[in-house]
Amino acid sequence: MTTYTKPLPAISSLNRPYWEALKRHELKLQRCTECGKVWYPPAPFCPACWSDAVTWQRLSGRGRVNSWVVFHQAYFPSFQDDLPYNVAEVELEEGPRLLTNLVGVDLAEIRIGMPVEVVFEDVTPEITLAKFRPVEQHSR
Amino acid sequence: MSLWDLREKAAICGVGHSPYGRRLNRSAIDLAGEAIRQAAADAGLRRDDLDGLIVSFGTPIGADADTLAYVLGLKLRCYLQTWAHGRFTASCIQWAAMAVNAGLARYVACMAAVSFSGLRKPMMGGAGDTEGAREGGGGHGEDPVFGMTSPGAGAALVARKYFARYGATSRQLAAVAVAFRKHAALNPAAIMREPISVEDHQNSRFVCEPLHLLDYCLINDGAACVIVTTAERARDLRKPPVYISGMQGLPAGREEFIWTYPGFGISQQAEYDYEPGLQPVYQMAGVTPAEIDALFTYDAFSILVWTALERFGFCRPGEAAAFTQEGRIELGGALPMNTNGGLLSEAHIMGWNHQVEIVRQLRGECGARQIANAQIIQWANAYGDSLIYRRG
């Protein structure tokens, strides 16, 4: 296995369950059992109603592209070989938006509103990233 | 109702700046010293009159307030600094206006100084930049894990969504860069003075698509300073005062994203049709957008000019793309903007160069780029803060 040289996430007391779920290939975010809100980034209590009634809920993994960009310049050397590469903001069915990379799609085909679903990319033994691919290409 | 009416109770009494350049081979403290001393001389103040200092864009990138006070021999009783983000310009001036009226200081130098060329490692978006490492992602919405780095990337997300939602184009955005370059050509202090065309903009390389290189501001060296005091003291100094008529604080929270207004639907913002109403800054100053003679904004990326115009009600959402065409934001147009050339073409001094220009416009000191009979000038930003200045 080649060494993964791209930046890795900083694991904190708040986001640890998110990253542990991804490692099991599950997309989970916090949900408030009082007001029903689902949010990102992880918080010590519900940012909508300040309730402590917070659970980690498994999400559908489906969403749509809210906006996206294409990098033509590498700010980290480890992204140099990927140029030009996309970064998308995906709006999950449950509401929150995540930054991610779209996989399995040509840059010319990306559209705002495009339906996508999560794919799990194991980049190191400890870290799995949530990336997204168009629903049509790989569903069923 | 505000308990403490600060309308025109504070004023700018002096302005100064260092040379601006891409590689000046001078440190941030060195440049800061020149800007502060020039501002004091402009106001007719001596070193020991300065008892307050607010440094924006401080450590770890810009000059820091501690070192500045120590190296320049200042004797301060009121000082602070904001971290290395550019958007605290209005906040610094607000705090200074409050401090002088509360008697915490008499004269507060407000400024930023930076020597990007002297930094050991690249600070904007690369491994030396701690912005993307902020817990929860930070204000620009960066995430280096996915290669989402540098402030321009968040602005590119906004631009893509704006284009799609309102049918606007990169070609229309070029008008912003072209207008500010025209202004810079009239400004001897500006770094980029060669005229550019819409074609030049369209042919410039993509950095973070859909933004081209000419949608991006400069990365440079320089310092700019304004001195805030009470309106009463300012009237007795060397130059005519420029009054601070209205102030509006920098908002924060889940409905805010640094490069656009609430309701736009980027990052965790809800998406809805934004209605600015009459923003608090106008209510404090007792004016409406129609009375503003010129508008200055933090143009780190050209798209911010559109979102600022819409945030403050100069245009309805989606209409800034058309509004910024046909010379409307140029000198002689309906609403001249960033007559110094802005961050795009004069220099990136975190908006402090814009404050210097506003004051000089209101004093009638701008020569070839003077706005005829300028009385009221506004500083207003995509991220929601604002100041309204009036000629004294």
Image: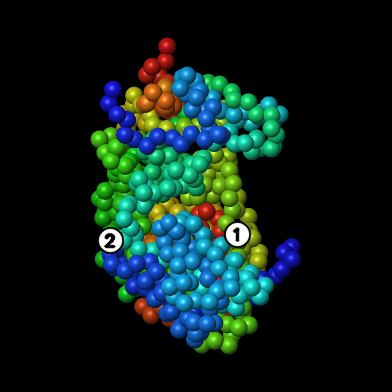
Is residue B152 in sight in this rendering? no
Query: Measured from the top left, where is residue B218 in percent x and y?
Result: 34, 59
- Residue at mark 2 to residue at mark 1: CA–CA distance: 35 Å
Residue at horizontal 46%, vertical 83%? B42
Residue at 38% across, 17% down: A138
Nearest to the observer: residue B33 or residue A114: B33
Q: Residue at x 60, y 61 (%)?
A: B248
Residue at 65% across / 66% down in the picture?
Answer: B284
| Relative height, residue A20 to residue B212 (above, below) | above
Label 2 resides on the chain identified as B
First in sequence: mark 2 or mark 1?
2
Residue to which mark 1 is pinned: B249
Mark 1 residue crowding within 10 angstroms, few (<14) / some (14–19) / many (20+)? some
Position of residue B224 measured from the top left corner of the image (x, y, whole percent): 43, 70
Q: Nearer the viewer, mark 2 or mark 1?
A: 1
Q: Is residue B113 visible?
A: yes
Q: Which residue is mark 2?
A: B196
Residue B335 lies, in percent from the top left, at 47, 66
Q: Looking at the figure, which quarter contains the N terminus of chain B?
A: bottom right
SS assignment at label 2: loop
Q: Which of A100/A64 is in front? A: A100
Rendered location of residue B159, percent (x, y):
42, 46
Disc 1 chain ID: B
Q: Judge the density around disc 2: few (<14), some (14-19), many (≥20) Cα neighbours within 10 Å.
A: some
Quadrant in which the C terminus of chain B is drawn? bottom right
**Element type at mark 1:** loop
Instruction: Please say if the residues under marks 2 and 1 sit with CB atoms less than 8 Å apart.
Output: no
Q: Inspect the image, locate mark 1, and give the three-letter code of the amino acid beneath it.
A: Gly
The answer to which image quadrant residue A73 occupies is top left
